[in-house]
Amino acid sequence: MSTPLLEVKNLKVEFPTRRGLLTAVDDISLTIAPGEVLGVVGESGAGKSLTGAAIIGLLEPPGRIASGEILLNGRRIDNLPFEEMRKIRGREIGAIFQDPLTSLNPLYTIGRQITETILTHLDVSPEEARKRAIDLLNEVGIPAAERRIDHYPHQFSGGMRQRVVISLALAAQPKLIIADEPTTALDVSIQAQIITLIKKLCREQGTAVMLVTHDMGVIAETADRVAVMYAGRIAEIGPVAEVIHNPQHPYTVGLMGAIPNVGDTSERLTQIDGSMPRLNAIPTGCAFNPRCTRKSEVQGQRCTTERPSLMPAGKTQAACWLHAQKN
């Protein structure tokens, strides 16, 4: 793999409360190369969106980065002052969020919002900024962009608004895009178009994408590698085809088994018993151990007493003591 564009090293995100500190993201490390799509998947509450928010510098107080480092092109960005981070956000890191209505100002035309972003980050004239905005709208598939650039967000459908948000994220030609559930609110045909668009950006512009989602279908179609998160940590990470077809962590096996197969004639889907632990009740040892059906295969009590780190597991890495016995 080429030199990473983004490096996240031992990232920990905490929330101070009256009852003590809650660790929402616990010792996450990952990399993304230029032109690569890294999918981040897991149940609600796994820490996927918080990881993305920490990278882009948009953690909601009282959430904070307690330790670790985030490097963009070798430069550390997690400790930058607010104004310096604001310059990086938009110029070097773009963001696409789940609900386009929260990303667009309803009082301004989409043209004004895109051109303001371009003028803030690029050294161009207002005329050049407007031309680039029209080109961006054409690129993301907005029909009659020359006319629609002067329309307001409410004059667009949900799918078209999400395209506008993507053009906004691309306005200053960022090297990295954090896409947090970009297709969740869209119907299947629009989802496919957005996925095609994201892949085109990676292929033609070398843009790196961190794609946060709970939809394994989107991951399978879009990502090069996938990180499966559980209770604030990475349970498994590796090439997308390996994680989907040959999962090595019991949690990933359960996730894959819960996806219906077109040719499957069984009456019931596989399910993972129980639910993800609350942040103030994460069990000792492996956080998945209360729900795991294979912990009896591990010698001793390691699953309930020691927390596993990522270790080689076939062609992926999995945080599971089952693989410590093989290595």
Image (cartoon, rainbow, N blue to C red):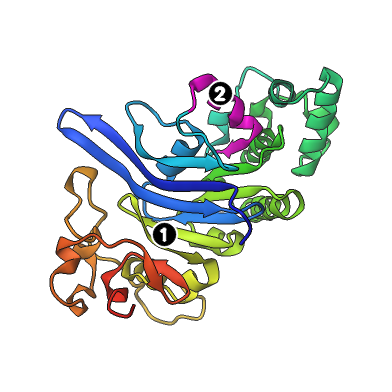
The answer to whether mark 2 and mark 1 are in CB contact below 8 A is: no
Is-magenta flag for residue 4?
A: no
The quadrant of the image that shows the C terminus is bottom left
Q: Residue at x 55, y 49 (%)?
A: 210
Q: Is residue 304 above or below residue 155?
A: below
Q: Amino acid at mark 2?
A: Glu
Q: Is residue 292 above or below residue 21?
A: below
Q: Position of residue 173 (x, y in %)?
A: 71, 37
Is residue 258 visible from the viewing direction of this image? no
Q: Amino acid at mark 1?
A: Val
Q: Position of residue 261 (x, y in %)?
A: 48, 75
Q: Is residue 205 left or right of residue 247?
A: right
Residue position for label 1? 228
- Image-quadrant location for residue 326: bottom left
Q: Residue at x 60, y 59 (%)?
A: 222
- Image-quadrant location for residue 252: bottom left
User: Which of marks 1 and 2 precedes in the sequence?
Assistant: 2
In terms of depth relative to the viewer, which is nearer, 299 or 270?
299
The quadrant of the image that shows the N terminus is bottom right
Q: Which mark is residue 84?
A: 2
Q: Is residue 122 left or right of residue 101?
A: right
Q: Is residue 128 left or right of residue 151?
A: right
Q: Residue at x 34, y 49 (%)?
A: 27
**Count of numbered circles on the image:** 2
The part of the chain drawn in magenta is: 80-96
Is-magenta flag for residue 85?
A: yes
Is residue 71 visible from the viewing direction of this image? yes
In terms of depth relative to the viewer, which is nearer, 150 or 254?
254
